[in-house]
Image: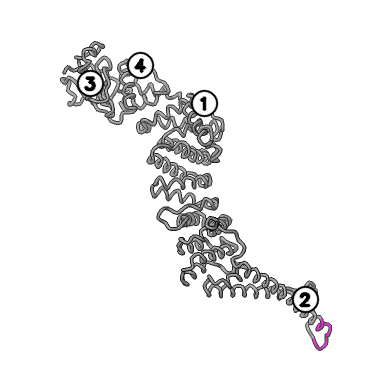
Amino acid sequence: MVAICDLEVDVNGEEAFLVSKASFLIMCNSMESLNQLCAAEICRTASLACHIVGDLDDLQGILSSFSGRLRKLFSKPSLSSTAETSKVVFHNFPGSVRGFELMARFCYNNGKIQITPSDACLLHCVADYMEMTEDASSFPSLIKLTEVYLLGIPCWPWSEIMSALRQCQDFLPSAISSGILDRIVDSVVGRITTAGVGDATPSGSSPESSAFRFSCDTRSSISTRSGIHRAWWFEDLALLNTDMVQQVIASMVLQKVDNVMISRFLFYYLKCGAHGSPSEKRKATETAIDLLHSLDRSCVSCKGLFNILRVASSLRLSKSCHGRLENMIGSQIDQATLDSLLIPAPIGIGSLYDVSLVLRFLKSFLANVGQASMTRVKRVGCLIDSYLAEVAPDPSLEPSKFAALITILPDAARDSHDAIYRAVDLFLEVHGELSEEERMKICCAINHDKLSSESCMHLAGNPKFPSRTAVQALISQQSKLKSLLQNTDSAPPKDSKHKKNRFDNNKLDCSTDNEKLSAQLHEMQWRVTELEKICKKMQTQMAEVMKNTISNPSGSRSLPMLCSRLIP
């Protein structure tokens, strides 16, 4: 077969270029199709001003005069000038076929090419890859030309900046190594901060973002129904792939952009922009979690984190990433709602709700907050009391997990233990098979001193509780009554101050001062009368409590969600 080219160039294994010393000859997807085409069209091809036979040294001189990389390749002994056709293979060539075409046209046109925002980044990366510097050529170097052109990035319209950023996605490693990506990303972040991060009016949005915004809004009106405040730049950045989003957000974090707006964008990106295969969705979710973890925790929505958690189970996130997500939720669990905590247990777990997950949230909360903010701790205590009322009726809930849920918070987290008592009462009613020892482990979590008189009396007569717990409840109630009587006994009468001063100034002398003795007797009679009134009042209250207990042993409380579902 007659050789119809001087140089064969394989670009990233995707295309094979046949190059003559005058111009391009042909481009094929495979060597098999190339051979077929060469055999059929050799005569026509030869007529296209293509030198079938030529001096390879001249061809090498054209390309190597602009590229230091090609000059090094052509100087190797393996590329002999006596060969009819030489072959060069490039790996990771920026822009693949498109990049090589632009580079070759620049060389064949004596170092002249029209640069536009749509190809400036690609030409710069190609020039860096091919070492097309001023040292390699007496002609204007391609890298110098692109450097000068890229100085005008601040003057580019927003749409052209975003177009250049999306183009860099196709050759991201080269864009990073050449430094061009940093320039484009800095320009994007600068434009966002200058125009206002939270500006709700887009200015110069790209056509792609307009179509994207229409598809999102017609699908679910995501900006309003999801509660996410959408800034004007959200749609454009949501069109980027995960790697590029990571680059942009990392730059925004370094430049101290408002963390609240960054977190809102990441939630928006996961809702609108993170599409594709399960592996692509997993990568996008893991990247978003890592970026959210780098932000100020107070700027990240707890509700948004729970939304990520609900879809995370189906994506099979890495263990470390799932741990970071749980840690972020746990650190602000005081902002959660009861509905957020009612997460179904994974398949294979007998219980209805994932109690182990809530326990991990609480451990993370205590590790991050400790006793520093008692207001937050008490808020969590109220939330967990409501959660206990929901999980207690679950017959599949393990006693050890229920006990851990009751005892994990410090005692100071609750001013009253009435809610814990009601939850334990309901749990013991459902788990009637528990042994005395198991019941005691659960009941030991109740602080009888923080029970109301009504709950304490109800516990004392509750057959579901161990006898020792009932005795402790009676002792606690007796101690409260004794303390009340002591306080009453020590309370002085209304005119005690006047009498005390009189008694202090005049010592008792029963034999000589009948008036003083009469005053003392009068004071003692007053104390007896007051004690009788208090006793009668307590007897009336206890009678009412016992009457209510007999008529409604479980007390008046609303049924938890689980019971509501089970009772028709």
Q: Position of residue 98 (x, y in %)?
A: 34, 24
The residue under label 3 is 7
- Residue type at numbered disc 1: Gly
Q: CA distance from mark 2 to mark 3?
A: 119 Å
Q: Secondary structure at mark 3?
A: strand
Q: Is residue 551 left or right of residue 105?
A: right
Find the distance from the CA under tag 2 to the CA under tag 4. Answer: 111 Å
Instruction: Give the crowd class for mark 1: few <14, some 14-19, many >=20 residues within 10 Å.
Output: few
Quarter holding the N terminus?
A: top left
Residue 453 visible, this orientation: no
| Mark with earlier residue (2, 3) | 3
What's the amino acid at mark 2?
A: Lys
Q: Position of residue 174 (x, y in %)?
A: 35, 31
Q: Name the amino acid, label 3.
A: Leu
The residue where tag 1 is placed is 204
Q: Residue at x 43, y 36 (%)?
A: 245
Could you say which quadrant of the image residue 513 lies in? bottom right
Precedes in sequence: disc 4 or disc 3: 3
Task: Name the mark nearer the viewer: 2 or 4.
Answer: 4
Indicate whether residue 302 is drawn in magenta.
no
Q: Which residues are magenta?
A: 510-518
Magenta-colored stretch includes residue 517: yes
Q: Secondary structure at mark 4?
A: loop
State the SS at label 1: loop
